[in-house]
Amino acid sequence: MTQHDMKFTEIVDAPALARAVSAIAAELGGATPEARAALLVEMRRVSNVGREKARSLLESDGSGLLCAARISHLQDTIITALFDFATTHVYPSQGSGTGAGDGMTVAAVGGYGRGTLAPGSDIDLLFVLADRRSGREEEVAQFVLYVLWDMGFKVGHATRTIDECIRLSRSDITIRTAILEARRICGAVPLFDALTERFDTQVVRSTAPEFIEAKLAERDQRHRKSGDTRYLVEPNVKEGKGGLRDLNTLFWIAKYFYRIDDEAELVKLGVLSKGEFKVFKKAEDFLWAVRCQMHFLTGKAEERLSFDIQREIAEALGYHDHPGLSAVERFMKHYFLVAKDVGDLTRILCAELEDQQAKEAPGITAMITRFTARTRKIAGTLDFLEDRGRITIADKDVFKRDPVNLIRLFHLADLNGLEFHPDALKRVTRSLRLVKNELREDAEANRLFLSILTSRRDPALILRRMNEAGLLGRFIPEFGKIVAMMQFNMYHHYTVDEHLIRTVGVLSDIDNGRDMDAHPLSSKIMPSVEERQALYVAVFLHDVAKGRPEDHSVAGARVARKLCPRFGLSPKQTELVAWLIEEHLKMSMIAQARDLNDRKTIEDFAQIVQSLDRLKLLLILTVCDIRAVGPGVWNGWKGQLLRTLYYETELMLSGGFSEVSRRERALFASEQLGKALASWDEADRQRYLGLHYEPYLLSTELEDQIRHAEFVREADREGRVLATMVRTHSFHAITEITVLSPDHPRLLTLVAGACAAAGANIADAQIFTTSDGRALDTILINREFKDDADEIRRATSIGRLIEDMLSGKKRLPDVIAPKSKQPRKAHAFKVPPAVTISNSLSNKFTVIEVEGLDRPGLLASITAVLSDLSLDITSAHVSTFGEKVIDNFYVTDLVGHKIVSETRQANIIARLKAVMANVEDEARERMPNGMVAPPTPRRASARRVKA
């Protein structure tokens, strides 16, 4: 492509700039401060105009490579003008034998050396000196650098002689890579030619294996640092797996090994096919377009494609909404498919390099290589061989001869614990056209696949290799539809296909007893699961219908009914898989959002699962699903909620749920507490036993009742009206704060506000009132510190803040205000506020579910409105899914009745939606300043359900 085609003259007029620079020297001299100031102004003007034009051209033609080349050309022109000004007017040559600048050359290195530069990238320069005797050249270099720094550029630089370049590049791979890509910008041509010639003969020659090994190790370390997956939903476009640095590494290796300067030569050499080279250039152009847009949008060298800019980048690149997928999700799917293409190209090149190195090894080395690389037969097959612990193909027609071998390759690798030879995976990728309906319906191919999926070894690893090779989505087209699909939210950390494969990995860990400590119940019941195959298939397919306009659980069940018979499952197993997929979100939502002490919750869930076998399978699927969402999503508290729901439902399904009346069970619980407090003075004991109502006695463990009793007695002895008590559960990843206070309609609002001010996330709240008008509330917050002592100090500090707010020492608006700013990422998301009111989820309470965009202090705002509406909160259950929050409140009116009036329900919904939308209303303006303790005594039943 010519410079005219690249529209370089539209970016910068080099002759005009040279004339402007000469005019400055003629008017103001060369080495004067005035000349330097004028030069700086002109250079800034040229740079700003040129970059704006580059951005405009990017918007019109969409080519990232052209944009990067245009900015690189702009920078070349500026540096050349500065160099000419310095060598001609500031430090002119004093001798007659050499012209200006003959003693040095300025070279671009790094990405800039390839003739590409992102808008916010560093400028990497190498000043090559003929020698260091005169010192003039180093002064020239300093002049150029200082002007560039004053222009606001970050400049990486080195000033070296050719001898120094050669010596350092032999010992330092980073310096060697920089010189490998060096490109002359200006200065002495013979000097630059001498550097490249000596570098090629004295450094590159005969050191290819060493360089390749170092660059691949560097790549692997970079991948590990960035999460070792190309499917993170906030990828690093430059350094992440499948990003630009991986493409750079491919070219560095190819250039070093094949001694080429242009990637197109890889096609002539037979390393890449024409189609693969086209994929290479398209991937490079796309990644550069994304990177340039990111830099332009943020005004800095932003390399992480974070949520808060994804939507704008998608719009800038011209993506539009489609049914089931938003524009940003379509853009990100394209990104991840490109990242996958980069992985394919890496495998192809590595396979070719390994073959070439084996062919070119001289003399005794070749003989040793042939001996150590001797292949071995694999039992039961003539089509595949073992090559140093890796499975490879016996001949190039293996897949063409029998397409089932595409699946058999992965099955044998699993059976024999072998890694994959890059040549085998290259052949798989190049043979995907063989995957047709005949193969998909082949009984043997499906039997082998089911064996891979349900393997007792490492099914996730094999599935991931199949996916990376492109085979998994071809063999199962329904899976292919969700390959590289992301969900635009802060909850899911991976693309859908990566999430499904990771879910299988978690199930395998539980199945093999590797997760006993984290998941004791799932690990305990897994050996008793009869339908192990059905469970693995359900786990693998549970999100396979994501991205469709309809509910993915319902659509996924329909997909399962189609695929399971193909895999060889019986009609009974097929229906079980379909049921698990259709209900796969149910157990998680009920455990986190419902009151598990409410019998109606357990009855409703038992009606859904209907059998102990289904209950076991749904529990394990739920655990695997949450665990595979991403780091930090699973915690011990979620595990405890799921275990509680499991045990309560198991009891009901097995007929062991007590039929004894609620009153009788409460009397029995009171008697048990009385026995536990036998050491107390009889009068104190009877007085304390008279404090609690049925809900407290029936829903609180005896151990906790005893702790509460000692806590209340100690507070009374010390005359404390307000008191808090803390304890932490490391396994449950939860910290408990118990609050004793005079009852107050806004008590939960104040407690929630204190927690928000301290940065604590409330997971659950149990609210009880005693017969003497006090509140005994238990607030569960997510644990933050690993060490118990640190966590206790944190919780104690939060407890003191709660006491200060309840006593009126601190005001709620004051403590929440510093925390009220929404996280930057949250602004990228829109979660329409939703409020539902149900009287069917509980026999005693109305359940209000609130869903919307999370923000600091939201729970305090919601509870303030509920209090204003004269609703008594009995329990609150808070679930956060990334940027979205779903809060459930069990409430009654002031006399303990459900909210049945449609007019009143409509008013509640309207007020809560206003709060969720962050719209100011009376309730928010009347948020309390605090509560002076003790308040005027009142009847306990006036505001809250008796405990």
Image: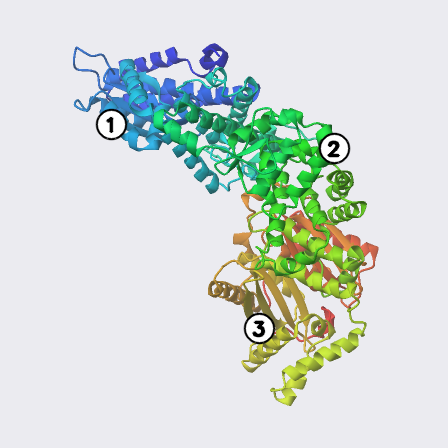
Q: Is residue 253 above or below residue 934?
A: above
Q: Earlier in the sequence, mark 3 or mark 2?
A: 2
Residue 270 position within the rendered picture, expressed as x and y whole percent measured from the top left: 50, 18
- Label 3, label 2: how far apart the Cα atoms are: 70 Å
Residue behind mark 1? 164
> For the residue marked with disc 2, what is the amino acid?
Glu
x 16%, y 10%: residue: 96
Residue 138, quarter of the rendered image: top left
Coloration mode: rainbow
Residue behind mark 3? 722
Q: Is residue 709 above or below residue 426?
A: below
Side of 484 relative to 604 (left or right): left
Q: Earlier in the sequence, mark 1 or mark 2?
A: 1
Q: Earlier in the sequence, mark 3 or mark 1?
A: 1
> For the residue marked with disc 3, what is the amino acid?
Leu
Q: Is residue 493 visible?
A: no
Q: Is residue 669 above or below residue 409?
A: below
Q: Is residue 547 above or below residue 134?
A: below
> For the residue marked with disc 1, what is the amino acid?
Glu
Residue 660, quarter of the rendered image: bottom right
Q: Quadrant of the C terminus?
A: bottom right
Residue behind mark 2? 441
- Label 1, label 2: how far apart the Cα atoms are: 64 Å
- Label 3, label 1: how far apart the Cα atoms are: 74 Å
